[in-house]
Image (spheres, rainbow, N blue to C red):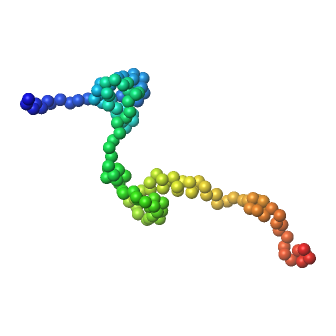
Amino acid sequence: MGEQNLNIRIKHKYDTEANWNKNNPVLLSGEIAITSDKFGKHKVGDGTHKWSELSYVKADLTKSDVISALGYTPPSSDTWRGIQDNLISSSTTESLSAAQGKILKELVDGKAPSSHTHTKSEVGLGNVDNTADATKSVKY
């Protein structure tokens, strides 16, 4: 049988997650249905199961795909060292990762304000008085 080229464009079903769940269609075998509000996540029908019974198709990513998407090679070991090196770097072209930003936020949020007070008992000095040494009896 000879080869024949068809000049056509195929449009897949495309709708919101809410509409897919509401209508819950049975997708034909091999039919692709894409969610418009889930960054292109999609399901492929098998001809018997409804939308809600199908799993999203998972992308087959390679390590180089992830590195390319991140824009840098994440450390393979000693992740804290990688974060620490980036935190002390003066580079203006490298941004902080989400994990680094979270660590910095926790440190800043946990820092006490510059003007604050503590009572003697809060710092473990509840029994101490402010009597000058010169006025204290040497007997006791």
Location of residue 140 (image quadrant): bottom right
The image position of residue 52, as x and y in percent, is 41, 27
**What residue sits 57% from the left and 57% below the top?**
107
* Camera sees residue 36: no
In-front residue for pair 80/113: 80
What number of labels is visible? 0
Residue 72 falls left or right of residue 80: left
Residue lying at the far left of the rendered structure: 2
Q: Say which quadrant the N terminus sits in.
A: top left
Relative to 140, is 111 above or below?
above
| Residue ID at (86%, 77%) | 134
Asked whether 75 or 72 is in front, the reply is 75
Residue nearest the observer in this picture, 58 or 6:
58
Residue 106 lies left or right of residue 25; in this view the side is: right
Q: Is residue 60 above or below residue 133?
A: above
Looking at the image, which residue is at 36% across and 25% down? 49
Left or right of 136 on screen, residue 101:
left
Give residue 8's position: percent from left, percent from top: 17, 29
Question: In this orientation, does residue 1 appear?
Answer: yes
Rendering coords of residue 62 (x, y %): 32, 49
Query: In x, y percent, where is residue 76?
Result: 40, 58
